[in-house]
Each structure stands twice: as C-alpha cells, then as structure tokens.
C-alpha cells in the first residue's frame, strides 16, 4: 500500500470515530441537562438519581459491554451495533458532565430562582435563561475530559464481541487492530499520527474556543474594580485558560457525593450503596437469565457463581487490586519528582508538558493491540505496562497543575522570608501538591480498573494475550467472549462494588485527611 | 379612611429546620396597604421582614392566614405586584436590556418591538440609557439596583414591594436612589399606586414613608404604628425628623 492509501484509510477512520464520539457527546450533554437539572431542582428526584449516577459512574465502562450489545443488537439488528458503540462511548463521556450540571444547578442563588418564579417565566424559558447559562461554563469545561475519556474507550467500543455476536465497526479502533494483526508498522504509525493530529486540531479549533465562550459572562461573579477590569481587558487573552482549577473534575463528583452523604450517615449510605449494587446485580442477572420461573432463574444464578467459583472470584479480586495499586504507585513514583523538578523551570516544563500532552492524547487502548504480540514471555509485565499507560498521566498532570497554580504571592513571600528548602516544601509545595495528588490518584485508579478489562486479557483475532494469574478483568473478558451474560454481570457487580468501597472507605478518607491536615478546604474547594 | 389595595390578614408563618425544630417567624400579622400610600415597615435584622414580603408577593404560602389583593386572595406571583429583592438579583449572563425584557415575557400579546421599546423607556427613566447592552457584572451596586427597579416597574404594577433596596449600595448612591424613588412616586400618571418599603434602617424609613409599622423581633408581631406628616423632601437634620425617629426607636425597644 502506498502512503496515500494509508492516509486515506486513517483519515476516514478518524472521521468515522469522531462522528460516533460527537453523536455520543451530544446525547451526553442532552442527558446531563435534563437529568442534572432535575436532580438539582427536585429533591425527590435527587435522592434517587444521585446514588444511581454515583454507582453508574463507578462501573468500569467496558462493563456495560455485554448488556449493551445484547440489548441493542437484539432490538435493532441493522443499526443496533452502531447504536451499541455510541452507547458505550456515551457511558464513558456522560457522568462528569451530569455531575457538573447538577452541581451548577444547586449553586444557583436562591434570589435568582425566586426572581425567575416571580417574573412568571415559563418552564422552557427557565431552562433557556437560567439553568443552561448557569451551568454552561462547567459543561463546556467538562467537554474536553469527556472527549478524552471517549477516545480511551473508542477501541473497545468499535469491536463488539459477545459470544457468537461479533461486529467490527469501521473506525480508529478497528483499523489499528487490523494493521497490528498484519504486522503493518507503517499503518499503525500513520493511524496513530492521524489521531494525534485530529486531537490537536480539535483541541485548538473546538475546545479552546468553547471554553472561552463562557468567559465574558463569568467575570461578573465578583465585581471587578476598574483597575482590575482594565488589566483583564489588556492581558485577558493571555491569561485565559491558565486559571482553570485542574482538580475541578473530581470536585464536581466529590461535592455531589458529599452533599448526599451529609444527609445520611456515612455508614448507612455506604451500606445502601453496596446493597444497591448487590441487589441491582442480582436483579439484572435474574432478568438476563431468561428462563421461565424465577426460582429456576435464581438456581441458574447460583450455578453461575458456582461455575465461577467463590475462591476464584476472591483471588481474582485480590490480584486485580494488586495490579491497580502497583500501577498507581509506579505513577506516583515518577510523577511527583518530575513535577517538582520541572514546575518552576518555565522553558523545560513547557517543552516537556507539551510533549507529554501529545503522548497522553494517544489513548492507551489504541496501543494495546501492539502490546498483544510483544512480551509474550513476560505476561505480568505486559499487563503492568498497559495498566500504567492508562494511569500515569492523570497523576502527573494533576500534581504538575497543582504546583503550577501556586499563587505568585506565596512564592514571593517564600523568597522574602528566605525560607530553607525544607520549609519551602513543607509550607508551600506540599500543601499545593497533595490534594491534587490524591485526586490524581483517584482518577488514575479508576482508569486502571477500566484498563484491567483489556490489559489482563486482550484478544486480537486469534491471538489471546492474558496474564497467567487470575484477575477480574481477565474473568470478565473470558465471560464476554464465552457469551456468558450472567457470569459477566456477576463479575462486573463485584468489580464495581470494589471500586465504590475503595472510593468511600479509602480514597475519601485519604482526601479528607489531607485536606484537614493542611486546612486548605477553602481554596481547594473552589 | 381609603380602601386597602393589599391586605395581610391573620398571617403567621413558621419554618421547619432539618432537625425538626420549628422557628416561628411571623405571628398573627394584620397589615393593610392603602391606595396611593408609601408604607414603611421597620424591624431588626432576622425579624422576618423578607419572609413577610415574600408572602405578600405570593412567593411563599403562609402557614396560616391569607393575603388579599383588591379583595381577591393571592395564590402566586402576579405582575400586579412587583418585588425588589435585598440583593440585586440580576441574571449575570443577560444584558441589562435582556434582564428587563425578561419581566415582559409573560405578556404574550406584546410584540418583540413593543417589549424592547418599553424596556428601553424604563431604563431611561432610572437613568440607565446607554447601558442597555452592558452585562450586570460591569455595573456598580447602585446601577444594578436601578436595573432591578426598572424591571420591577416595567410591568406597570399597582404595588411595589421593596426589601431593603439600599442596603447593598454605598451611602451616596443610596441618597440619590431614595430621591429618585420619591420622585417616581410623586409622578401622577406613573404606577405603582402604592409602595411598601421594608428596612432595619429607621432614618431611611422615616425619610420616605407616609406611615410606619414597627415590628418586634422573633416571632415578628406588630408593636405599633406611626403616621408621618412632614413635607417631602424631608430634612434628616430637622428636629421634627428626630422626633419621629425617636418615637420609632422607643416602639422597637
Ligand atoms: N427558608 C428558610 N428556612 C428556615 N429558616 C428561614 C428561612 N428563611 C428565613 N429563615 C429564618 O427566618 C427568620 C427571618 O428571616 P428573614 O425574613 O430573612 O428576616 P429579615 O429579612 O428581617 O432579616 C430568620 O431567623 C431566618 O433564619
Ligand atoms: Mg431580609
């Protein structure tokens, strides 16, 4: 094949994938505006919707796989697979946007709500003049992370395999997989290059302008003094995009959950969450078993658990936890020193972060097929590398942004007081780096869990690259390829429960500890 | 005695906290606002003035009792009664003009041009012509309150309710705002017919009102009433002014 053909194929693939993601994104925004606004304004709906959303967003996205395929393909045989792919991408994009709308709606001043009611404007006008503009900046800010998330799962979403059903949709994911299978290095390189190019262009031409759309309307939060507004007008363009709080993303979610947990004691909410999961999982499994009597369905379920083996499930969970922990620890180990080393060196940090940003924009999943053929004698190392590829940047960029956001005044003060390096680190760097480090770790752990489904067992044509030791991801993948719907629901229920437990019992505590120790709730929360 | 345009009859109101406690805010209120009157209600912060105004505007349903507008019970916000909030509640993402236009959305029979025309003329009246396409964030507190006033008046209300409209404005601006409200009131053909001003600031109440109702704190009950017969504009340094202020302070404490 000549280069032109490569270019044509890869740009067509990018176009197809981009179209799918755009449709999914539109649905995500629509869904978020409806559900987020309702949850933010209706107390009864809030009580049901937020726990459900909390749980849905902690289910590793690829876990929706078996259900989505079965459902969509069965319902609509012709366009079903395309819809299933869009649905899967949707599940990877939607939750943070929904939480952003919810949070934004709740923060609308009560005077404005009263005014809207008072002026007697209609429901549709309320949406147009109140809810949408009030939440738009947050939504726009969340679009880019959502898009990145979507790319990450693109590969998985375009190759739909479930038992007998196997559909390949033309797009980035399939094209890369095929090139890899054929050992076509040029093909892989062109496609990945095209992906990076498309990402850079989309960022510059769509996301950057989008975040600016909301800006002139935002500055009115606090009244600007004449002088400040003058400075803004002159330096505005240069300042834009700099002050965005990098840990905002997690906060949307964190605040939303916190809001809820404030109302119920932590343990009841935790118990409810886990119970909800187990019951939900049970119910879904019972429905998908699909034989006549409910009693026999229960029997099938027990049989499926028996088939999987309790011991096997437990062991898989332990191994998977270990792999997640290893990936997160490794990411911390290199990210923190590098971030501290470069954060104050303007030029170096510019080059390095630009470079890393490009690398990070290549979703780990797209290079997974390349991993499949390599390192076959070191399968654990291969899985580790794949997991790290999906994990590390979250940590690095969070810590880096945290250090970058140290206010100039604090740095000047440190200079003025001629503090020793130890004190500098303790007084300024650590308080600024720790909260983002924790939020980075939480996001990274989520990413790691997601990637386990592929990195523990990757199937590419006839090649199966899996870890010798058990793992939940491997188990889920096996169930999926066997077409064992009940089995996969059981595994995904277990996996999601583990993630929720980790979030509530471990990460939230670590986070609260860091915040309370450093007494920086105020700034961090903003 | 002339007839009441708005009357509060036996209104009591409680709030219930999340812990199940009951806060009695208003207790057995009876207030009449007469045609053409400027009524002042004075009470300490937290005594329930805002709650009372919201009830009169139909935003809150009282725990017991009712409010009548021209002898008909009020069940929700109506364009005949306008409310100016304590905080200048403007939509920050809409321009000054759009904010005022919003109040006219409920009049479906008006054309787009008529709506804009009317909004412009009211902005002009409060001294904001030329600021139509500015966003509220770029305005000072006093200018914001003027936009709110234009928005409250643009629907031609019979009754204007004002909740401490000068408390977020610097003292000098407050002086000119008070003067303007007084002038608007003196205008024969312009609505509103009656104004109710609520404040914890005794001087500003005495400066503007024809009659003053004094509230006690927690739960708010009516302590007494003072009629003010002084020519406008009133001189804050005159001995008569001080007599009124003293009389009200005595009732409050
Ligand atoms: N929505 C509410 N829920 C519970 N308590 C409230 C609410 N609104 C006001 N209150 C309480 O009612 C009392 C009166 O409030 P408000 O009417 O705002 O007083 P004022 O306007 O005179 O300062 C205050 O003690 C306040 O805490
Ligand atoms: Mg008040």
Image: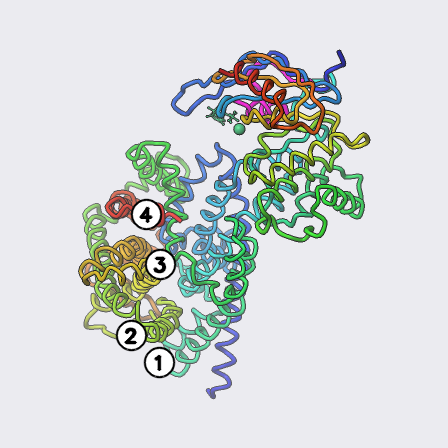
Viewer-nearest of discs 4 and 2: 4
Residue tagged by mark 2?
Answer: A373
Callout 3: SS? loop
In this picture, is A465 found above or below A442? below
Chain of the residue on which disc 3 is drawn? A
In the rendered view, does A122 fall on the left or right side of A191?
right
Toward which corner of the image does residue B184 lie, by quadrant? top right
Q: Which residue lies under the disc numbered 1?
A: A183
Q: Are marks 1 and 2 on the same chain?
A: yes
* Callout 2: SS: helix
Marks 1/2: CA–CA distance:
9 Å
Q: Looking at this view, is B60 or B81 the one in front?
A: B81
**For residue B180, which quarter of the picture?**
top right
Task: Identify which residue, A305 or B127, lies in the foreground.
Answer: B127
* Quadrant (top left, top right, bottom left, bottom right) of the N terminus of chain B: top right
**Do pointers 1 and 3 mark residues of a single chain?**
yes
Q: Do residues under tags 1 and 4 come within 8 Å of each other at their CB atoms?
A: no
Separation of residues labelled 3 and 2 (CA atoms): 48 Å
Q: Chain of mark 1?
A: A
> Taking A438 as reference, is A18 left or right?
right
Q: Are marks 4 and 2 on the same chain?
A: yes
């Amino acid at each position: 094949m000549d280069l032109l053909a490569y270019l044509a194929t890869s740009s067509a693939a990018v176009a197809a994938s981009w179209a799918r993601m755009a449709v999914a994104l539109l649905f995500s925004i629509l869904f978020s505006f409806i559900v987020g606004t309702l949850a933010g304004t209706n107390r009864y709906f809030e009580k049901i919707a937020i726990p459900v959303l909390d749980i849905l967003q902690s289910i590793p996205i690829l876990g929706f796989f078996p259900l989505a395929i079965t459902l969509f393909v069965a319902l609509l045989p012709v366009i079903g697979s395309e819809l299933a792919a869009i649905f899967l991408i949707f599940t990877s994009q939607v939750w943070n946007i929904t939480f952003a709308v919810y949070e934004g709606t709740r923060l609308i001043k009560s005077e404005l709500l009263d005014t809207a009611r008072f002026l007697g404007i209609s429901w549709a006008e309320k949406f147009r003049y109140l809810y949408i503009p009030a939440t738009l900046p947050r939504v726009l800010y969340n679009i880019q992370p959502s898009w990145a998330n979507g790319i990450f799962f693109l590969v998985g979403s375009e190759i739909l395999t479930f038992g007998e059903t196997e559909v390949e949709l033309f797009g980035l994911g399939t094209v890369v997989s095929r090139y890899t299978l054929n050992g076509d290095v040029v093909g892989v390189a062109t496609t990945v290059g095209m992906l990076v190019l498309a990402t850079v262009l989309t960022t510059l031409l769509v996301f950057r302008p989008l975040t600016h759309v909301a800006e002139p309307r935002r500055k009115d939060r606090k009244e600007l003094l004449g002088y400040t507004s003058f400075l803004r007008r002159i330096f505005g363009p240069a300042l834009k995009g700099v002050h965005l709080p990098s840990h905002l993303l997690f906060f949307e979610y964190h605040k939303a959950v916190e809001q809820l947990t404030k109302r119920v004691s932590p343990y009841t909410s935790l118990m409810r969450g886990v119970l909800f999961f187990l019951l939900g999982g049970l119910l879904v499994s019972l429905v998908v078993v699909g034989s006549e009597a409910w009693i026999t369905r229960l029997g099938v379920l027990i049989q499926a658990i028996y088939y999987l083996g309790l011991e096997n499930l437990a062991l898989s969970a332990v191994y998977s936890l270990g792999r997640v922990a290893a990936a997160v620890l490794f990411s911390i180990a290199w990210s923190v020193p590098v971030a501290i080393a470069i954060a104050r060196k303007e030029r170096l940090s510019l080059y390095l972060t630009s470079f890393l940003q490009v690398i990070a924009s290549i979703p780990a999943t797209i290079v997974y097929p390349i991993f499949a053929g390599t390192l076959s004698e070191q399968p654990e190392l291969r899985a580790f590398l794949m997991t790290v590829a999906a994990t590390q940047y979250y940590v690095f960029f969070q810590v880096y942004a945290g250090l970058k956001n140290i206010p100039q005044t604090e740095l000047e003060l440190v200079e003025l007081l001629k503090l020793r390096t130890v004190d500098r680190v303790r007084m300024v760097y650590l308080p600024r780096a720790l909260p983002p480090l924790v939020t980075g770790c939480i996001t990274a752990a989520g990413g790691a869990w997601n990637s386990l489904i592929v990195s523990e067992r990757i199937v590419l044509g006839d090649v199966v690259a899996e870890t010798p030791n058990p793992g939940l991801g491997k188990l889920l993948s096996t169930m999926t390829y066997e077409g064992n719907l009940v089995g996969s629901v059981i595994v995904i229920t277990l996996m999601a429960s583990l993630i929720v437990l980790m979030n509530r019992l471990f990460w939230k505590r670590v986070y609260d500890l860091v915040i309370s120790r450093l007494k920086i709730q105020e700034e961090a929360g903003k | 005695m002339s007839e009441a345009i708005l009357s509060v009859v036996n209104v009591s109101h409680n709030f219930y906290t999340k812990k199940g406690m009951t806060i009695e805010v208003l207790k057995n209120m009876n207030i009449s606002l007469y045609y053409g009157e400027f009524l002042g209600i004075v009470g300490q912060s937290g005594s329930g003035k805002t709650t009372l105004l919201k009830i009169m505007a139909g935003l809150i349903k009282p725990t017991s009792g009712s409010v009548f507008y021209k002898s008909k019970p009020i069940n929700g916000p109506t364009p005949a009664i306008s409310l100016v909030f304590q905080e200048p509640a403007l939509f920050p993402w809409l321009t000054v003009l759009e904010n005022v236009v919003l109040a006219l959305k409920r009049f479906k029979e008006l054309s787009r041009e008529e709506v804009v025309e009317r909004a412009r003329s009211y902005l002009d009246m409060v001294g904001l012509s030329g600021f139509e396409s500015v966003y509220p964030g770029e305005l000072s507190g006093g200018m914001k309150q003027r936009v709110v006033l234009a928005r409250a008046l643009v629907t031609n209300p019979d009754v204007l309710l004002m909740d401490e409209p000068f408390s977020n404005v610097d003292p000098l601006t407050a002086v000119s705002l008070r003067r303007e409200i007084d002038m608007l009131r003196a205008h024969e053909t312009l609505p509103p017919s009656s104004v109710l001003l609520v404040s914890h600031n005794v001087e500003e109440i005495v400066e503007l009102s024809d009659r003053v109702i004094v509230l006690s704190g927690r739960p708010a009950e009516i302590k007494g009433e003072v009629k003010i017969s002084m020519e406008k504009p009133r001189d804050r340094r005159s001995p008569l002014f001080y007599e009124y202020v003293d009389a009200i302070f005595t009732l409050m404490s």
